[in-house]
Amino acid sequence: MTLAYLSRRVGMLLLIIFVAVTVNFMIARLMPGDPVENAINRLVAAGGGSVGNVQEIAAAYRAELGLDESVWKQYLAYWVNVFQFDFGTSLVHYPARVSHIIWAALPWTIGLLGIATVISFSVGILLGAALGWPGTPKFVKALVPVFLLTAAVPYFLIGMVLIFFVVVTYRVFPSGGGYTFGSELRADWPTVQSVFMHAVLPALSIILSSIGSWALGMRGMLISTLGEDYITLAQARGLPKTRIFLWYGVRNSLLPQLTALAILLGHAVSGAVLVEVIFSYPGLGFRLFEAINGKDFFVVQGIVLILAISIAVAMFALDLLYPLIDPRIRYQSR
Amino acid sequence: MTQPILQVSELKVYYHTSQGVVKAVDGVSFSLQKGEKFGLVGESGSGKTTTAMALMRLLNPPAFVEGGHITLNGRNLLALSEEETRRARGAEISLIPQGAMNSLNPVMRVRGHFHDTIGAHRKVSRGEDMSTTIERLLRKVGLPPDVANRYPHELSGGMKQRVIIAMSIALEPSVIVADEPTSALDVVVQMQVMATLDQVQKDLGAAVILVGHDMGLMAQFCDRIGVMYAGTLVEVAPVSQLFEDPQHPYTQLLISSLPDFETKGRFRGIPGLPPSLRALPPGCTFHPRCPKVLDRCKTVVPAYREIAPARWVSCHLYDGGAG
Amino acid sequence: MNVETSVQPATTERATAGAYLRRSARFFSGNKPLAAGLGLLLVVGLLALVGPSLVNHDHAKVGAFPARLRPSGDHLLGTQTQGRDVLTVMMLGMPNTLKIGLIAGGVGLAIGVLLGLLAGYFGGIIDNVVRALSDTLIILPGVAILVLVAVSVRSMSVELMAVIVASLAWMYPTRTIRAQVLSLRERGYVNVAKMNGMSGLAIVIQEILPNLLPYIAASFVGAVSGAMLASVGLEALGLGPQNQFTLGMEIYWSRFYGAILRQMWWWWAPPIAIIAFIFVGLLLTSMGMDQIVNVRLRKSS
């Protein structure tokens, strides 16, 4: 890994964080009027929150945001706050800190999305490889249209269908939440079991809807890789079929899939947000939805920022992994 | 004459497309002696590359061998099982392909390619032995031993092609098929690669089939040349005789169209266009473009005959009144 | 020195209607995904065009019928909790959903083509800025950013929704077009045009743009598909137009009123089915277009 490659990746990471923070800052202030006034007005209009305290909250906010200062000072202060992981206070659950809400929700999202993505990516790639393998029996290839359907349909729609069939009709899995309602989270067996059971359906809807696109992408890539000159020469050199397939075909088709994974992370998070909503899963997506419905602007802002930064970091990690897999990257910058 | 090492007789390869059958190779016969350098020339679409791929048994659907025999070291290649074919590839008959730039696995070091090639046919001895073998092979094609540790993208086109040549001789095959091995390289590198191929071939004593369209390159390298037109061999002759005294009207036009020092700059070309392989003209496939066309050329397919020692032609001009 | 001097004759086919039909039949039979995808989209498009005039708009009003009727002869898809006829709501929602997708995809494409052309043709600083911007925004979670914007808007309409979604629909087209312009720029005819003293703008419009058409078409399908995904997602979160019918808002309302747990499948299933239908159509179309574009890529390399 060269310094040029590394510095380029770090630069990218910083740029993304910069853009995310700035956009976040600007959107709140581009709206006509005072952001606090606006936020509280929306809150009151929605009939939520502790309406009696409006003036007290507003005053607290103005002081905190330094709204009497110049825009540049506000912007600087916003950066300082971001570095301290301070996103202000919830309007609905005043005086709960936004950062607290985020910390509580983050593990759920990372767990759900991380596991679901790893499973769907690896199983999807394997299935795709099988679909591209000339020796695979015909009935497996009949999966292609099924994958087409699941790949096309958005995550959360599959979630809704799953709820209907599995929860309402068969009552196998709980319909929502992260663990049994009203119980306490402890490190014991029933809790683990309940957390697992609650994660199955949301994870399954993410897996089902993304596995198809991974499989199809891998299949397409593999088919075009198998047409490469180095495959022909490998055959001419008398290499065994499986060796050619795995080390010349699959190995080379894998690289573009990893790039795709990096690019599609944002897409996956967007989808996961909606899946959490459908299953009332207590991750960031669901908190975001609650905040949207409750017009809890600062929570929305904080969660959006955290989502953006998490993706940037995950992508950075993938970028560091990439040169280990593709020798060509070590010497060029993408 | 000794038993030929490779004998191709009446080889037919057809492409079965949705718009009809394409007769890419339609009854090609030739044979190769041990250590002989045979050139196969023709326009694109004349079937020369298809013939080469048929020799390797690397035809992909919709191309199928429709008939004929390919006998290599006394065995009919076309009758071998899939596993036997695999064992023959690389070990008895090896390929130097067209696309040197893209014929090595981009994520594998050069060393790995040699490992794979040799390991596919022999029990590979680990460590020292293998390293010395690879080093020896690389040195043979004029590459420094440290090339073994490089990835393909770190090599130039000429170096890649040398690596491929080194691999093609790794198992000491009796026939090497070189399918336009220098087409993607620039002229200086072309010459160097051809010289390397020539040297390697001399050391090894393998027969080479050089497929190409560059008559100059052919003349320098080959002992004998076969001229293909629309899926058939129209003439086979030793190089000097072919250039000095071409028999088939197509070969004559081909040779006379080459620029030489006297008629410098005058490139005449051959009038007309090659026929569509989907709808070949009846009789001799060359008759619509032939300046010496006879009536019977339009209806009767000329026989492929030996008109003088080592000179084969398929043309009605040499029927000798028999037809 | 080459034997390869002659060129295969171009097959000339008479430009009659019959020949045209035969040619397109052959084209589509060689590209089944495209034929199937365009077919599906055509069905949806026709339904969206004709649908609203076939139904009585009053049937979609609150309390038009008794609530929660199961599907029957009178109400093919039943009624929902507020007494609206589901079939009528679907017919009225479909054009709006498609409208959002088409407007957002179109605007996104226009921005993308413009930026891609600028970046690819002029290079330098413009290229760097455009590339950094599109590479950055492409990996941000689109729905999250859009949520922020949508939350800040006072009242949402179909048109505003389209514009908001379009603001994040231009990155893929930008990347595709930029990459193509970069490769086209190096082709011979562009250099010839340059040497003949053609201005930069004239080259872009006369020489480069026509060659980009297949990529623009493919990008359009991609942009529409991305925009639809984003808009349906926003709507399902309740951020869509509250007072207009769209498929995504129907999903939101059906969830809001607990249609799944009440087993009112006739309410939540139709919008999902139609959306799935549209997305399958879009996916097939883009796969078909990929085939065409890739063949061109292979031939031009």
Image: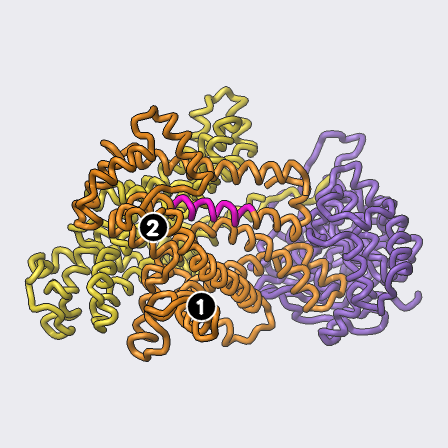
Instruction: Give the camera-side residue of B14 and A1.
Output: A1
Residue C226 image point, x, y percent: 37, 50
The subunit letter for the residue under badge 1 reads: A
List x then y, in percent, for residue C228: 32, 51
Tell me the subunit letter for badge 2: C
Q: Which chain is assigned yellow?
A: C
Q: Colour of chain B?
A: purple
The range drawn in magenta is: A304-316
Q: Amino acid at mark 2?
A: Ala
Front residue of this view, candidates C147 and C32? C147
Element under disc 2: helix
- Left or right of residue A333, residue A305 in this image: left
Residue B186 occupies quadrant: top right
According to the picture, the residue beneath numbered tag 1 turns out to be A186
* Front residue (pair C85, B269): C85
Indicate the quadrant containing the C terminus of chain C: top left, top right, bottom left or bottom right.
Answer: top right
Q: Residue at x 46, y 33 (%)?
A: C130
Q: Colour of chain A?
A: orange
In-front residue for pair C6/C153: C153
Q: Residue A81 at x, y = what percent?
A: 42, 37
| Amino acid under disc 1 | Arg
Mark 1: give few (<14), some (14-19) or many (20+) Cα within 10 Å. Answer: few
Residue drawn where x is 47% and y is 42% of the image:
C176
Q: Main secondary structure of the magenta part?
A: helix
Q: Which residue is mark 2?
A: C230
Give SS at disc 1. loop
**Does the rendering let one see residue B263?**
yes
